[in-house]
Amino acid sequence: QEEIHLFVLEFSRTPEGFHRVLEEDDELTACTIALQHRGFAASCGAKIFVDPYQYKAAATQALELQSRHVVVSERYMETVLAAVRRLKGKNKVHEKCENRREVVLGNHVEVTGLVDNTKLNGQMGTTFRYVQAKGRWAVRMDADGCEVLVLAKNLRLKDDELLVKNTFIHIPGDSAVSVSTGAKTY
């Protein structure tokens, strides 16, 4: 089973030149055309540069993002960064490297350490997106299919590893990704 590695990049600002260099780069233009040929429309917020088979996972991540963000696969990351480095003068921007982050989708996790909703402690679920605005993971609980939002510190992976947000994105190739609108927050 192949894993998909995605990165969420955040840039300092988005002058007109920022969007122009991303739209005019030959490799990024080819990526956008390939996505459009598969029926994927450009998002109005974050830019997305991934292979078509990665698009649904990337689009789910882009929901909470703004125009200063780019969701990118390993294949296109250096191309995006090189294009942005070409900006000079009043159009110059920089990546906020400290905000580059991972979202691990499809990981089976155990909820632990909740104080207010202790009935969820010890229950298992699957992460399906990181909600940046709330700083929590969306988790679909195994027991009832309920969707809840949980802080990373309250999620445990296998082998007692805590789930953290600032690493790589690993998405199993066959994972089902969906959008949640009514998840409870914990």
Image (spheres, rainbow, N blue to C red):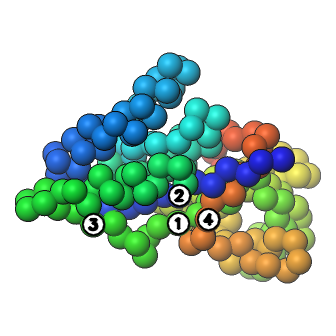
Instruction: Give the spatial CA distance, label 3 vs label 4.
Output: 20 Å
From where the camera sits, is residue 184 visible?
no
Whether residues under marks 1 and 2 lie with C-beta atoms below 8 angstroms apart, the answer is: yes
Instruction: Give the spatial CA distance, label 2 vs label 3.
Output: 16 Å
Which residue does the image show at 87% across and 71% down from the upper left?
A: 158
Q: Amino acid at mark 4?
A: Phe
Residue at the spot of label 2 = 7
Whether residues under marks 4 and 2 lie with C-beta atoms below 8 angstroms apart, the answer is: yes
Q: Earlier in the sequence, mark 4 or mark 2?
A: 2
Q: Amino acid at mark 2?
A: Phe
Name above or below for residue 96 compared with residue 24: below
Q: Earlier in the sequence, mark 2 or mark 3?
A: 2
Q: What kind of element bears circle 3?
A: loop
Residue 3 x %, y %? 73, 51
Lateral position of residue 167 relative to residue 20, left or right:
right
Q: Earlier in the sequence, mark 4 or mark 1?
A: 1
Identify which residue, 69 or 127, lies in the foreground.
Answer: 69
Q: Which mark is residue 94?
A: 3
Q: Earlier in the sequence, mark 3 or mark 1?
A: 3
Q: Earlier in the sequence, mark 1 or mark 2?
A: 2
Q: Amino acid at mark 3?
A: His
